[in-house]
Image (tube, helix red, strand yellow):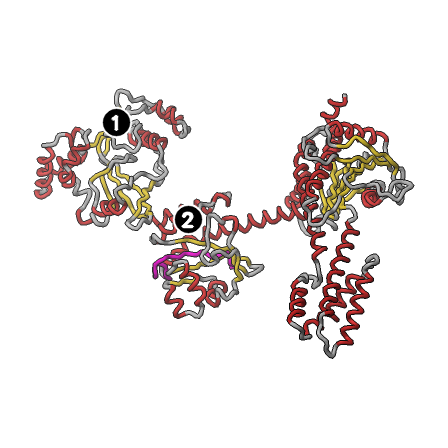
């Protein structure tokens, strides 16, 4: 027969009623007349169709004799139970069945003509091996438990998917070897049961069609929709990776099966106890929706939107049920919630709290477009699924906390990935110590014999620019106030107004001089305390009132002062820092490929960075001084690229600012220690402190014997102290000049003595600022050596 679920099988399948006929022959010999006569009558009818005993190969014979089959199987399919039991004749695992009970027929009718009944998650591999296991169990008498639960997923008349557990009865089947069958030894059987996935091995021991399956089986289904749906939900929710949680459609279908409501929809929100807010988890934005929050990302749980409706949910952690939204609007004072649901076409709803250890984690939202679909009775079904939802939300919160901690570590602390292993090792030592208590003394995190690299791109004259913008804003504000006072209509306050005008003019004149430390605060306090009350309490002409309105609209919300020019400066500073930091961070990822090293950067009035490289930072990888040279060349090339980035950005800035670049060369290995009090790394030891002193003061230093700064816009200044450092960097510069990244001219000079530090020298070279500059091309130290040699 060709009505198989899977075409290839170890069986030649023959449908036969021979075992049933044999049982009728025994009954016919019985002394009980009514049973004997009944059996003889059946046997007489069957005698006319010998295929019932010898075997049916043509499915048309079954279709033609449906009434007779129903009669001879009447003891197996009692008429009194036909509307209750879900049974049919079948061949196990194969998609052939007939002689359905009335309830089975109704289920198939409701599923529709296009429905194709097949076993869930049952592929050709499982089909073949399960048939082989039938042979091992029945013919070879092996005790093999191979029957995992099988299910049919069948939709009802409303489209709700229901799940039916499958049970097989094979009492009326016979398994017979053919001449092509392979005789198995116990060793063969042991080999098979140890190699379930080796389909070729199984086929070699059970060749296709090498056995005969003669007879028929009985399939019985029972409705396991709720249990199966809960199992599916558990499988989806308890996946180890929260990113793979099923989509909203899958979750909704599972809940539809549990509640048997075709129009059911599912939503979810997280509860944030710190802020007492309901939050829609962004992580699942495209997977799980919310009907309470709708378009909002978060809502205060004490908001008037929820009113007193959610008091029971929040305080007693009990479900909030609305079986009829329209009736809820009529009877409840919280019209806003009801109308919000009604706008979405929701007529009934259940909002169930997800609670763990007495703490509210979130709320599950079940809604339907029909009144009374959801009610206090079927809401109790949520008790079956809430434990799994609780575990999922708890895992979501834990995962979120871990990610937040990771973000804090990445964005707000100095624990760089290159040194994270040492912090982790010490933390593990603490955790694994059987006596870990508050008295446990953490070992200091120290990296010895590392080589430092320091560089910066600084906003040129940032303090002067900042002061200048402050003066402009103050002048503009004072001028605007004087214009308003000039247009004031004459009144009894004329003398007072004249005095205030005089004071405002005096302050404006004072701003022509260099800005003092307290000038801004003095003017701000004067305007707020003396000028603003006059403007707010004086009635004036319509024209002047308009001027006053425009004036107050121009004030910054935070400072209460004019902030236009300072805002341009601050925005320009922010744009430069953000863009240059982005370039540096991106290039730093490439630099880590040279050799793992510690990296940190800071945004001040520009961007600074510290690098430390050495064997102690990456003890599993051999260190060579060549890696330091490579990193130095990378640093110089990266500063060139950052200079070029600023040049291209400069014209689009809201406030024009120049930058200066500097590299400090230090060839002496030093140690860095993590300062627990400051939560950052610092150089260790008195001698090494000299390096920190130079770092803090070098950018403000002058060329020896002059008043000129060692740094200059569009140029990179390299500060060093040893001849071998000079030779090394001149090679780098020569190579970058050859690559048209740096201009041909080089300046060399001595640096003025700093406090406790003398003998510093510097090289200064200009970056070529044009669109053809290919500073982004990666150049290694080896490239330089190859070309120079």
Residue 676 versus residue 771: which sits nearer the camera? Answer: 771
Residue 295 versus residue 610: which sits nearer the camera? Answer: 295
The answer to whether residue 409 is above or below residue 293 is above
Image location (x, y in percent) of residue 389: 46, 52
What residue did someone put label 2 on? Answer: 251
Image location (x, y in percent) of residue 301: 52, 62
Q: Quadrant of the C terminus?
A: top right
Circle number at residue 12? 1
Residue 446 versus residue 105: which sits nearer the camera? Answer: 105
Disc nearer the start of the sequence (1/2): 1
Residue 532 versus residue 754: which sits nearer the camera? Answer: 532
Circles 1 and 2: CB atoms closer than 8 Å: no
Q: Residue furthest right?
A: 705
Looking at the rendered image, the disc whose residue lies closer to the viewer, 1 or 2, is 2
Circle number at residue 731? none
Magenta residues (range):
358-376
């Amino acid at each position: 027969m060709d009505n198989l679920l899977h075409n290839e099988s170890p069986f030649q399948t023959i449908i036969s009623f021979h075992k049933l006929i044999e049982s009728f022959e025994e009954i016919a010999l019985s002394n009980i007349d009514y049973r004997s006569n009944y059996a003889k009558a059946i046997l007489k009818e069957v005698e006319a169709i010998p295929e019932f005993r010898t075997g049916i190969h043509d499915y048309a014979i079954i279709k033609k004799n449906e009434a007779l089959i129903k009669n001879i199987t009447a003891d197996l399919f009692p008429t009194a139970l036909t509307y209750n039991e879900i049974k049919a004749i079948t061949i196990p695992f194969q998609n052939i069945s007939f002689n359905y009970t009335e309830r089975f027929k109704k289920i198939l009718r409701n599923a529709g003509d296009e429905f194709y009944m097949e076993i869930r998650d049952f592929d050709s591999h499982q089909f073949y091996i399960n048939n082989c296991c039938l042979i091992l169990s029945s013919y070879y008498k092996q005790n093999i438990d191979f029957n995992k639960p099988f299910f049919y997923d069948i939709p009802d008349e409303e489209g709700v998917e229901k799940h039916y557990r499958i049970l097989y009865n094979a009492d009326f089947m016979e398994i017979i070897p053919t001449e092509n069958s392979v005789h198995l030894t116990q060793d063969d059987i042991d080999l098979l049961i140890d190699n379930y996935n080796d389909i070729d091995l199984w086929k070699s021991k059970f060749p296709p069609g090498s056995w005969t399956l003669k007879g028929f089986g009985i399939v019985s289904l029972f409705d396991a929709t709720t249990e199966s749906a809960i199992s599916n939900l558990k499988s989806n929710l308890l996946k180890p990776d929260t990113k793979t949680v099923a989509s909203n459609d899958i979750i909704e279908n599972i809940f539809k099966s549990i509640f048997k409501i075709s129009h059911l929809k599912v939503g979810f929100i997280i509860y944030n106890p710190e802020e007492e807010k309901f939050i829609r988890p962004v992580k699942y934005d495209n997977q799980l929706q919310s009907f309470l929050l709708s378009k909002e990302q978060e809502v205060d749980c004490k908001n008037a939107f929820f009113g007193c409706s959610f008091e029971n949910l929040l305080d007693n952690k009990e479900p909030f049920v609305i079986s009829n939204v329209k009736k809820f609007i009529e009877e409840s004072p919280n019209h806003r919630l009801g109308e919000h649901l009604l706008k979405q076409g929701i007529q009934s709803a259940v909002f169930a709290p997800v609670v763990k250890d007495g703490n509210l984690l979130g709320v599950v939202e079940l809604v339907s477009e029909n009144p009374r679909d959801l009610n206090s009775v079927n809401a109790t079904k949520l008790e079956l699924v809430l434990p799994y939802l609780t575990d999922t939300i708890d895992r979501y919160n834990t995962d979120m906390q871990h990610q937040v901690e990771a973000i804090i570590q990445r964005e707000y602390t100095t624990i760089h990935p290159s040194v994270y292993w040492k912090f982790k090792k010490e933390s593990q030592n603490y955790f694994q110590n059987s006596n870990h208590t508050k008295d446990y003394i953490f070992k200091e995190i120290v990296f010895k014999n590392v080589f430092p690299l320091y560089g910066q791109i600084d906003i040129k004259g940032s303090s002067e620019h900042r002061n200048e913008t402050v003066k402009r804003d103050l002048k503009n504000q004072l001028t605007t106030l004087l214009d308003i006072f000039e247009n004031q209509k004459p009144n009894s306050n004329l003398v007072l107004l004249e005095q205030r005008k005089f004071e405002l003019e005096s302050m404006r004149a004072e701003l022509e001089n260099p800005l003092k430390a307290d000038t801004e605060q003095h003017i701000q306090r004067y305007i707020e305390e003396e000028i603003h009350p006059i403007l707010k309490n004086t009635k004036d002409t319509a024209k002047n009132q308009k001027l006053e309105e425009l004036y107050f609209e121009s004030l910054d919300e935070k400072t209460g002062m004019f902030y236009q020019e300072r805002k341009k400066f601050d925005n320009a500073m922010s744009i430069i820092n953000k863009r240059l930091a982005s370039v540096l961070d991106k290039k730093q990822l490439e630099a880590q490929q040279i050799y793992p090293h510690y990296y940190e950067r800071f945004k001040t009035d520009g961007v600074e960075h510290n690098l430390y490289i050495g064997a102690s930072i990456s003890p599993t990888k051999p260190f060579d001084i060549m890696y330091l040279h490579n990193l130095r060349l990378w640093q110089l090339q990266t500063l060139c690229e950052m200079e070029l980035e600023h040049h291209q950005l400069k014209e689009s800035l809201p406030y024009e600012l120049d930058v200066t670049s500097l590299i400090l060369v230090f060839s002496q290995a030093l140690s860095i220690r993590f300062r627990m009090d400051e939560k950052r790394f610092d150089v260790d030891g008195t001698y090494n402190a000299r390096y920190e002193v130079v770092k803090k003061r070098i950018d403000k230093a002058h060329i020896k014997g002059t008043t000129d700064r060692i740094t200059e816009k569009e140029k990179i200044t390299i500060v060093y102290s040893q001849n071998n450092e000079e030779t090394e960097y001149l090679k780098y510069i020569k190579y970058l000049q050859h690559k048209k990244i740096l201009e041909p001219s080089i300046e060399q000079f001595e640096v003025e003595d700093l406090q406790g530090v003398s003998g510093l020298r510097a090289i200064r070279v200009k970056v070529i600022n044009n669109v053809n500059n290919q500073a982004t091309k990666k150049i290694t130290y080896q490239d330089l050596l190859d070309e120079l040699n």
